[in-house]
Amino acid sequence: MPQPLQIILASPRGFCAGVNMAIESLDLAIQAFGVPIYVYHEIVHNKYVVESFRRRGAVFVDRLEEVPPKSYLLFSAHGVSPEIRRIAKERQLVAIDATCPLVTKVHLEAIRFAQAGFTIVLIGHEGHDEVIGTMGEAPQAIVLVETPEDVDRLDIVDETKIAYLTQTTLSVDDANRIIARLQSRFPQIQGPPKEDICYATQNRQEAVKRLVREVDVALVVGSQNSSNSQRLCELAQEAGCPAYLVDGPEEIQAVWFDGARTVLVTAGASAPEVVVERCLHHLQETFGAVLDERVIRPEEVSFPLPRELRNLQKVAPTR
Ligand code: SF4
């Protein structure tokens, strides 16, 4: 009789403190203020989460012109530029700011360097909501790089006043390669006082790196537009392990497990545990898989709710 498939379940995985805070904020805002509640961009980059809130009456918009004046508007965990805050004010929207404090930290570093006359090299992915928000803090002072080759093409006027910052959800290894290239080209470059890639991104990547050696295939639960989920999948693939990013059990293909004896299951920082559980259940039902959870690093981080919601926390009725 063949051995059943063994699931190695990575911990930490799934929701980080910023995502928890953003989701709780929207939940509380819906309870307290009713619907529609408008959300600038997706609250977090996860299909299941966004669809669940859409069914409850949240309206996700990419342009503030779509929001009727004086409506409630929530800024997502990825943060926004000052220009978006200005437009929200102009339209008399009641803004609730669920930006992750670790994204705000990068914004503040950008402001500080820009005010001191530095050119800021932001390492990140073009078009990502977080990058758009951070660049909006000092558009004249920030240039974006995505690869070490981009560093070679930089044209910096004053090489004594240059600093770098990074998106919070990058691959630690990719970012280090780009930082090394920056430091070699611009020896005087300054960095953030404490690194910008957040604890949740680092911990989930560390867990994959440590556990992927033991498995034949890896499953990452998360959405295609989730940067940190994509990075987990790439990390497993770079280690030579076939890896797949799935939004739920319906996307899992039996052929991926042909000849496999072990599978690593993890989840990006915006993927809910309920979807992880459904995937585990599917693997158990289909392959008689057995579960082995491995805690690589305990996590006990939490962030306070946005100022605008703190007093509501105790009084909001539940529906
Ligand atoms: S992934 Fe990191 S920066 Fe992004 S919301 Fe979570 S804790 Fe904040």
Image (cartoon, rainbow, N blue to C red):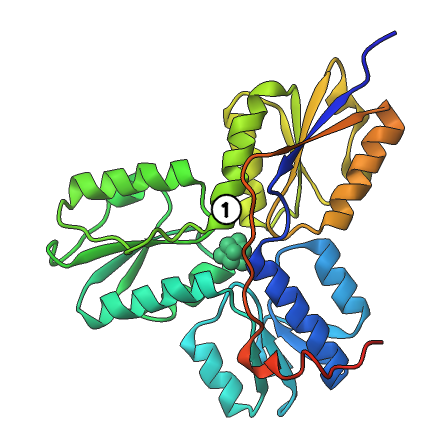
Q: Secondary structure at mark 1?
A: helix
Disc 1 designates what residue? 201
Relative to 67, does residue 259 appear above or below in the rendering?
above
The residue at 14%/59% (across/down) is: 161
Q: Nearer the viewer, residue 74 or 63?
A: 74
Q: Is residue 209 visible?
A: yes
The type of residue carrying mark 1 is Thr
User: In the orientation shown, which residue stands out farthest toward the top?
Assistant: 1
The residue at 58%/54% (across/down) is: 16
Q: Is residue 42 visible?
A: no
Q: Horizontal placement of 30 versus 62: left or right? A: right
The residue at 25%/53% (across/down) is: 191
Relative to 311, does residue 137 appear above or below in the rendering?
above
- Quadrant that contains the C terminus: bottom right
The residue carrying mark 1 has its beta carbon less than 8 Å from ligand 1: yes
Q: Horizontal placement of 171 versus 77: left or right? A: left
Relative to 296, does residue 167 appear above or below in the rendering?
below
Question: Residue 248 at x, y = what percent?
Answer: 77, 43
The residue at 63%/92% (across/down) is: 70
